[in-house]
Image (cartoon, rainbow, N blue to C red):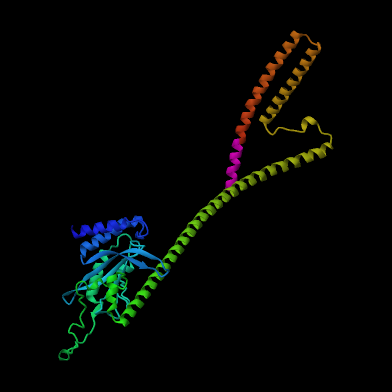
Amino acid sequence: MVPHQSTQQFLSTVLSQRGPSASQYTEDSKWLIRQHLVSLIESYPSLQPKTAVFNHTDGRTVNLLQAQGTIPMIYMNVTYNIPIVIWLMETYPRHPPCIYVNPTRDMIIKRPHAYVNPSGLVSTPLLQSWVYPSSTLCDVIKELSGLFGLDPPLFTRQQQNPNTESMRIQSNSGRPAIPPRGAYDQSPYGVSPSQNMNHRTDDPVEIYKKNAISKLLESLHGDIATLRKNREVEMEGLFNAQGMLRQREEQLSKGVREMQQEKEGLEQQLQMVLMNTDVLEGWVKENQVKVKINKGNLNVDQVFEPVDALSKQMLDCTAADLAIEDVIYSLDKAFQEGSIAFDHYLKNVRALSREQFFHRATASKVRAAQMQAQVANMASRASHSQYAM
């Protein structure tokens, strides 16, 4: 089987697992994770994908993917292999991976280093400015290989030969470390039995240092994850609050517009009331003078005066209509009592009804003309009130 095909099969199996041993990645990100790792292994065959258990500081253990191996580094026209471990955390690929330089027993981390801290954690510009979904693992490793070539992160330890005839410092002690093939399988985060057996032959001081560094790194990762989660929750709360404030702003703006429209309507109504008040006050003053002149002796027919010809015509038609209605009622009563003959009753009712019809038709036409005049008057008043405002 072609190597990259076996890698694809391995990743498909791991990412499709269910149950307690399943990986902790979201379903919508698994396809992109698989593509990133496949592209990485095709570009850097010395890196191999694995599954490992990651222990959080709060006691949680999760199954994660990692790529472990070496990456090339050209220093002084010589190619060296730098052992690294790439952890894909639960939030990958929305957040950058965690990359560590993984020195072997005969290597030490250069201090200080621009991109590697004493614990081996790598921090590069691309990792700090990670952009989802455009950033990839291949881009990070390519950048890392170039940066390490400018400033190597590892050096071999200075060792003395026990043979007294060749007591000297190794000539390559000041050159970047060249790890032997297979030596980079060791990791401060590994949990395999073979690594535990190798640790038994290590110096107790080195074992203590590695365990302490491992604990510190786990604590640091846990604190960073907790801090990031808290900040995401805070940002989500702020976004929700911002949405609610915008909604309330729209409601307030709508309420202000409605109140402004209502205010304009009330001002127009007030203008109409003031105009009508002036008319009524003038009418009262005029009639008070008439009362004083007549000394209380008023003619009932002269109490009301039409304001125009249409009003006078409407008053006459309405009075005639009601008078004819009273006459017909009297004729009905007289006919029921036998005071008037039937043919005489019918003749009078027919004539009165014809006259009443003409009065009612005239009143209907006058009423339509009055309505038209009233509409024109109201339009004229509205235009005058706008000019006044």
Q: Quadrant of residue 148?
A: bottom left
Whether residue 31 is visible, yes or no, is yes
Relative to 211, residue 49 above or below: above
Relative to 119, residue 368 above or below: above
Whole-percent x and y of residue 38?
Answer: 24, 60
Give the left or right position of residue 344, taking residue 13 as reference: right
**Residue extent of the magenta highlight:** 375-389
Instruction: Depth check: give the residue in front, 91 or 190.
Output: 190
* Furthest residue toward bottom: 164
Whole-percent x and y of residue 152?
Answer: 24, 77
Whether residue 101 is visible, yes or no, is no
Instruction: Depth check: give the residue in front, 43 or 66.
Output: 66
Instruction: Depth check: give the residue in front, 116 or 195.
Output: 195
Whole-percent x and y of residue 359?
Answer: 68, 22
Whole-percent x and y of residue 329?
Answer: 76, 18
Relative to 87, residue 287 above or below: above
Q: Quadrant of the N terminus?
A: bottom left
Does 313 appear in magenta? no
Does 386 appear in magenta? yes
Q: How many marks?
A: 0
Q: Quadrant of residue 345?
A: top right
Q: Residue at x 24, y 82 (%)?
A: 157
Q: Residue at x 59, y 44 (%)?
A: 384
Q: What secondary structure prevails in the magenta region?
A: helix
Instruction: Depth check: give the residue in front, 96 or 38.
Output: 38
